[in-house]
Amino acid sequence: MGEFGFLRDERWRRGVIKDAFGRGFLGFLAFAVFTGVICWIVKGNVAFWQTLAHDAELLAKMLPRIVVALSIAALIWVMLPRDRVSALVGTESGLRGLIIATLAGGVTPGGPSSAYALLAVLAVSGADRGALVAYITAWATLGMQRILVWDVPFMGVEFSVLRGLVSLPLPIVAGLVARSLPLTVTYRSMD
């Protein structure tokens, strides 16, 4: 079938469409239509079309970022040695794994499109749920881009250092809590 023969596979195409436009997508679409109707009724025709134009502009700005972030995640997925990831942040990594995940989350640049794409790669590469929670908590609370772009300019160095020090244990505590919960988490493979 060749390298791209899977594109001719009907089951593969149906699976992609089901994954992309499944119940979650339809639920969001229904909610968007509902809120659009409410906007039309409450704010009128002009406000509705202005909002729709603003949304299209936002989508046009975000789409290239999402494509690049997902491309980077796909390249990392291909190049990442899964056995090393599992050793660093897997179930047997202990507190060291949570610290590594916290450091990685703190230095991951970009917005949610890059952080969650990398989180998915880590999940299917063998990282345990505690490390995943520590990673995304560190990204959200200790991200260097947030500190440098928002904290320091708006609140000053002293506040930024204080907030960083106070927030430092949060990802590790969150990872420990995630490990202790009696839940089973399954991840869909990216293969």
Image (cartoon, rainbow, N blue to C red):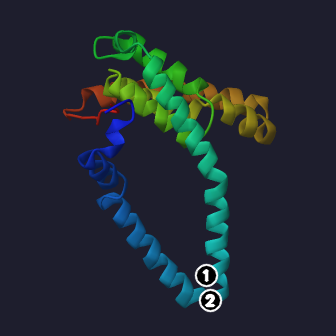
Examine the rendered structure and indicate whether residue 36 appears above or below residue 102.
below
| In the displayed structure image, the side of residue 150 where residue 175 appears, left or right | left
Q: Quadrant of the C terminus?
A: top left
Which of the labelled discs sits on residue 108, or is there none?
A: none
Q: Determine crowd level at label 2: few under 14, some 14-19, many 20+ residues with C-alpha closer than 10 A.
A: few
The answer for how far apart the CA atoms under marks 2 and 1 are is: 5 Å
Residue 152 shows in this picture: yes
In terms of image quadrants, where is residue 90? top left
Binning the other alpha carbons within 10 Å of mark 1 as few (below 14), some (14 to 19) or many (20 upward) gives: some
The residue that label 2 is drawn on is 45
Residue at horizontal 35 percent and vertical 65 percent from the top: 26
Q: Position of residue 16 (x, y in %)?
A: 33, 49
Q: Secondary structure at mark 1?
A: helix
The residue under label 1 is 48
Residue 99: image location, x then y, percent: 46, 16
Q: Where is residue 146? Give x, y as percent.
A: 67, 36
> Residue 174 appears at what percent x and percent y?
40, 30
The residue positioned 39% from the left and 23% from the top of the image is 131
Residue type marked 2: Asn
In the figure, is residue 143 to the left or right of 102? Answer: right
Residue 181 lies in what quarter of the image? top left
